[in-house]
Amino acid sequence: MATKFSKETYLYWYELMLLLRRFEEKTGQLYGMQKIRGFCHLYIGQEAVAAGCMTATNPDDKFITAYRCHALAIAKGVTPKASMAELYGKATGCSKGKGGSMHLFGVDVGFFGGHGIVGAQIGTGAGLAFAERYKGTNNVALCFFGDGAARQGMLHETFNMAMLWDLPVVFICENNHYAMGTSVARTSKTLDIYKLADAYDMPADSVDGMSPEAVHNAVLRAANRAREKGGPTFLEIKTYRYKGHSMSDPQKYRSKDEVEEYKEKDPIDHVLNVLKTQYSVADADIEVINERVKKEVEEAVQFAEESPWPSDDELLKDVYVQEDYPFIVD
C-alpha cells in the first residue's frame, strides 16, 4: 500500500528542493564570475535524494558525504549564508573559509562533511555509526557516496566490518550514472550497484532517486532497521545530475537528449504538480515560497560578499589538535 504524504510534507519538499536548486544555480553563476574558486560540483537534478532523506530521519542522525556537498549540508541545517560564505572562502563560512566548495561542515547540526578523497567518507561514516552505538544513542548515520566511489576498496572493507558489528548505518550510493565522466557500464560488470551488498549478506535495494516519496520510504525502512539493532542497509538511489561532474566538465560523454529526458522527471516539477492537483495549492501560495527562496539566496550572497577574509593568524589554527605542537615554525 502506497504511503500517503501530507500537504505539509509536499510543501516542505518543494521549498527545500527549490532552495537547493536556486542556491546551486547561483553558485554556478558566481563561479563563472570568479567569485568562487577551485573545484565546484553542483547537485542540480539530485534534490529529491536530500529531500526524502530529511523527512525520513531525525535531527540527531548524522550525515556524511563526498565533495558534491552543498545541498546535503543546507538540507541538514547548515545555513545558506554560512554555506555561501564558505564557497567564497570567507571567515564566516561554516569551515571558517578553509574548506571551500568540497569541504562544508556543520558538526553542530550533524553534518560531518564534504570529503574530497573518493570513498574516504565510507569508512568515516561507519565510524560515526560506531560512535553512536558506543554512546548508546538511538541515532543513525547516513553515509552518501557516488557510483564512482563504489569501486573503492574502502567500501568492501567497511561493508564487512559494519555487518560484523551490526552498525546503525545506511550506506547511500547516489548513482548519477557517470562518476566523473565514465558510465557505470564502462567501469563495472555489476550494473546494479546495490547487489554489491550480497557478498556481505547486507539488506539492499534500488531506489528511484527522482522521487522524494520513494527515497523517503526506502530511507525510513533502513533507518528503522538500524534503530532496531538490525544493522546496516545499502541503498542504490538512482538519480541524475543535469550539470557536469564539475564546473570544468564539457559533458561530451552523454547526449543532450538524454539530459532532457531526465529533466522530464524533474522532482521539483513533480512535487509542484502534486501540490496543485491533489492539494489545490494556489499559485499565489507557491509564489510566496518562490519569493522566500529567492530572498534567502540573495541574502546568502550578500552575506558572503560583505564577510571578511580569514585573518593571517588563522593559517595554522585547526590543523593540529595539540595547541603547543612543537614542529610548527612561527
Image: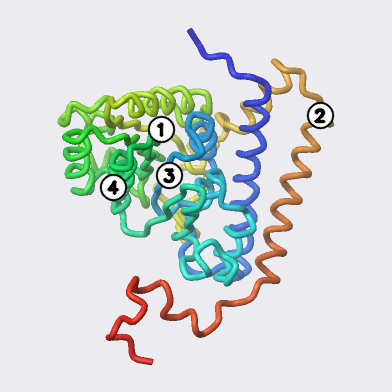
The residue to which callout 1 is attached is 238
For discs 1 and 4, the disc positioned in front in the rendered view: 4
Alpha-carbon distance for marks 2 and 4? 46 Å
Alpha-carbon distance for marks 4 and 3? 12 Å
Of residues 160 and 215, the one nearer the viewer is 160
Q: Contact, CB < 8 Å: mark 1 with mark 3?
A: no
Give the residue at x 28% y 25%.
230
Name which of mark 2 and mark 1 comes first in the sequence. 1
Q: Amino acid at mark 4?
A: Gly
Alpha-carbon distance for marks 2 and 1? 31 Å
Name which of mark 4 and mark 3 comes first in the sequence. 3
Of residues 121 and 117, the one nearer the viewer is 121
Q: Is residue 59 left or right of residue 177?
A: right
Which quadrant would the C terminus be assigned to in this image? bottom left
Residue most extreme to the bottom: 330
Q: Where residue 184 appears, x then y in whole percent? A: 30, 40
Packing grade of label 3 (10 A; few <14, some 14-19, many >=20) is: many
Q: Is residue 269 left or right of residue 127?
A: right
Residue 137: image quadrant is top left
Q: Amino acid at mark 3?
A: Phe
Alpha-carbon distance for marks 1 and 3? 19 Å
Q: Where residue 324 appears, x then y in whole percent? A: 34, 82
Name which of mark 2 and mark 4 comes first in the sequence. 4
* Residue 127, label in figure: 4
Q: Contact, CB < 8 Å: mark 1 with mark 4?
A: no
The residue to which callout 3 is attached is 63
Determine the secondary structure under disc 1: strand
Q: Amino acid at mark 2?
A: Asp
Packing grade of label 2 (10 A; few <14, some 14-19, many >=20) is: few
Q: Where residue 104 appears, x then y in whole percent? A: 48, 58
